Image: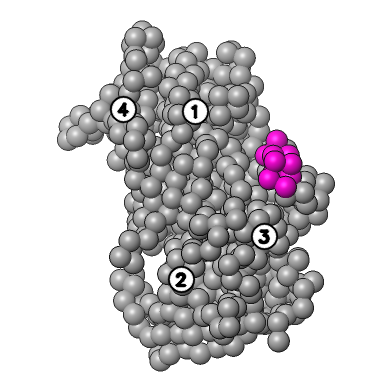
Amino acid sequence: MNVIRGRELDGAVERKCDVLVIGSGAAGAVVACELAEAGQDVVVVEEGAYLPASEYGRMRPTESMRHLWRDGGLSFAVGLGDTPMINVMMGRCLGGSSLLTGGVCFRIPGSVLHDWSTRLGLSELTEHALEPCYASVERAINVTEVPVEMRSRSTVLFAEGAERLGIRMLPLRRNTKDCDGCGRCNFGCPHGRKLSVDITYLPRAIAAGASVYSDFAVDELLIERGRATGARGRVLDGPLARTRARFRIRARRVVLSAGAFNSPVLLMKSGLGRGRSGQIGHNLTLHPGFRVMARFDEKVRGWRGSLQAAYSDALERDRITLVGLFVPPGVLAATMPGIGAELARRAATIPELGVFGGMLHDEAGGNVNLSFGQPYMTYRMSPLDRRSVPTLMRRMAEIWFEAGAREVFLPILGLGPIDRDRLRTLDLEHVPGRSLECASQHPLGTCRMGTSAASSVVDPEGQCWELPGLYIADGSILPTSLGVNPQLSIMTMATRIAWRLRERPLPS
């Protein structure tokens, strides 16, 4: 793939194009591909580095975190009130977080679309209207159901326990082809079997004439006569992100696809956010996730098989989705309780561990803020969401014990393993939020779509109410939480916006 690496350039960069796409992840790559294939002159800029699959596939998970993840995988949303600190994992590389997902692909749940099209007035966002967009993306990235035989022993055990309690497990769909079940999905597939956008959409965009730059950090949008006309920023020199040169790209149309964290930050840095809605950076949802582990009297070796193969929506009335997962042993060892010799003893039991995850279909409780030029996230769980956390932990522990687990590790810092009797006596309803271990890979909603400039950031076509000529296509525009992994939803919405743009004449 012929990517222009900023770290290899000498001197400033000045460009003109039809469409400037800021961000190369799941949404930006889709928009760039669709518009380039429609004959438009497209430039894509990406803050992160370009690492081909042959390079990131050879990395250890810890190397992947250093080179592909934002902040080395240590970005956090600061918990307010009785809310835990939430580790928000985001990609910072060409292809963005699509390189670092488990590959799970859900369509937007029908109940969510019904809410958007009725309560929020987004009447065109229906299952029928989005069907062609879904189909286009699913063909491009090969979304298929994970066969039962690809389930790891960890997933099989959890499913057995769930079925005994009347909780039905369903197969996940993922964007893979010939997956060999190595369990490395979240750290860049080492075999090129996960069809992330660096393997699918970006090569198509380049083949159609798009120019793709890595190491290009946008500082602010160019605005002339009240209209977006491009962007300016810094060319970075490599891992230390020092400024090597400057760039300025003028465009007839700008598409911002920097994600739910960086898109509102760039808008605020460009002087936006003073409009009627005051919604830029607000309404952050995260799908707070909790990992529950169990130790068995057998070798489980949960890393053998599809990383994510099954899920259950049986607890949706409690705002909970159960989703399979596992973590490479080297990373999992670092998260085990204890220090020194105790940690070493616990880490030695990893082959006997099963792991499964649960996440909340949360309300909009977070914000992306900018203070003295530095962005940060805050998040406060709603009372309804907070009450679901003890239910999630208790139900998942019960499932593991029903599957035959000897002991269970709840996501409570400092607790250690528990048995079935200890579970019955634990007062989970009064565990402080600061004692919970919580993570997210699904930041959404900070530039939400709506029908009025008074209550949203972009219109139903994706154009920013406050700045004509600027379109936003990424997870930030989703109006509410989904309750499911958002990769396919983001790519589908980006396809819809791109198709509308290719039908709209470019400004002169």
Q: CA distance from mark 4 to mark 2?
A: 38 Å
Give the prevailing secondary structure in the magenta stretch: helix
Asked whether 226 or 100 is in front, the reply is 226
**Amino acid identity at mark 1:** Leu
Asked whether 424 or 156 is in front, the reply is 424
* Residue at the (42%, 69%) spot, across then down: 269
Read off the residue under disc 2: 271
Give the magenta range: 111-121
Read off the residue under disc 1: 384
Quick one: SS at disc 3?
loop
**In this view, the mark in front (4 or 2):** 2
x%, y% of residue 210?
64, 79
Read off the residue under disc 4: 432
Q: Earlier in the sequence, mark 2 or mark 1?
A: 2
Left/right placement of residue 265 relative to residue 250 reads: left
Q: Earlier in the sequence, mark 4 or mark 2?
A: 2
| Label 3 Cα crowd, 10 Å radius (few <14 / some 14-19 / many 20+) | some
* Residue at the (34%, 72%) spot, across then down: 241
Q: Earlier in the sequence, mark 3 or mark 4?
A: 4
What number is the disc on residue 459?
3
**Amino acid identity at mark 2:** Gly
x%, y% of residue 401?
45, 15
Vertical position of residue 508 compared to residue 259: above or below: below
- Verify whether residue 480 appears in magenta: no
**Amino acid identity at mark 4:** Pro
Q: CA distance from mark 1 to mark 4?
A: 16 Å
Residue 485, image quadrant: top right
x%, y% of residue 10?
40, 90
Q: Earlier in the sequence, mark 1 or mark 3?
A: 1
**In this view, the mark in front (1 or 4):** 1
Quick one: SS at disc 4?
loop
